[in-house]
Amino acid sequence: MKKRGMFLAAALMCALWIQGCEPFEKEEKLRDVDYTVICPEDVPQELADEITNVKEKEFQLSYDDGEYLYVARGYGSRDTSGYNISVKDMYITEHTLVLDTEITGPREGEDVVDKKTTPYIVVKTEPMDKQIVFE
């Protein structure tokens, strides 16, 4: 009987956990956010150091220096050159700042160098107290 009670308690906890794990409901876009894509040499040193530590794998980072918010998205190691990252959209919702980026590979016929690259993008925007969502 004791085992049955423990099983029922565990089953109830699992059911509550599954119910609480519903897919994230996308919030309504309130407005676009002005941003600037910055060159690696313009990235604040503290963020640049962190990017160096994680750029071999995909990453999502942010850094607020009090004057600007920097948001970085990396796509990990690639075997060749020729990859480009673009910002498809950047906007705020009631609770979040959304950064939607995409990576494109070398185009057909493009000259590429067979060397390891670690493509990433850093955007600079106004500071804001919102959760950042990467799409």
Image (cartoon, rainbow, N blue to C red):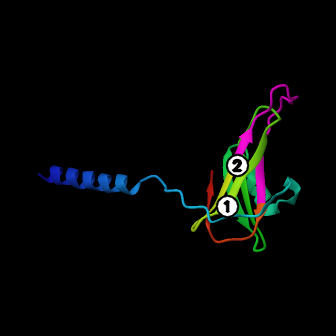
Q: Which residues are magenta?
A: 101-123
* Place of residue 62 in the rendered image (x, y in percent of width and height, measured from the top left): 70, 61
Tell me which residue sits at (63%, 50%) in the image. 135
- Could you say which quadrant of the image residue 94 lies in? bottom right
Which residue carries the number 2 mark? 101
In the figure, 108 relative to 95: above or below?
above
Q: Earlier in the sequence, mark 2 or mark 1?
A: 1
Does dot 1 land on a helix, a strand or a loop? strand
For this orientation, the residue located farthest to the left is 1
* Place of residue 91 in the rendered image (x, y in percent of width and height, measured from the top left): 67, 61
Tell me which residue sits at (26%, 51%) in the image. 11
Tell me which amino acid carries mark 2.
Answer: Thr
Does dot 2 land on a helix, a strand or a loop? strand
Callout 2–callout 1 Cβ contact below 8 Å: no
Q: Is residue 115 magenta?
A: yes
One can see residue 119 in this view: no
Disc 2 from disc 1: Cα separation: 12 Å
One can see residue 80 in this view: yes
- Relative placement, left or right, of 132 versus 81 is left
* Place of residue 109 in the rendered image (x, y in percent of width and height, measured from the top left): 85, 25
Front-most of residues 51 and 60: 60
- What secondary structure characterizes most of the magenta part? loop
Which residue carries the number 1 mark? 91
For this orientation, the residue located farthest to the top is 109
Tell me which amino acid carries mark 1.
Answer: Tyr
Q: How many numbered marks, from 0 up?
A: 2
Tell me which residue sits at (26%, 55%) in the image. 12
Front-most of residues 34 and 79: 34
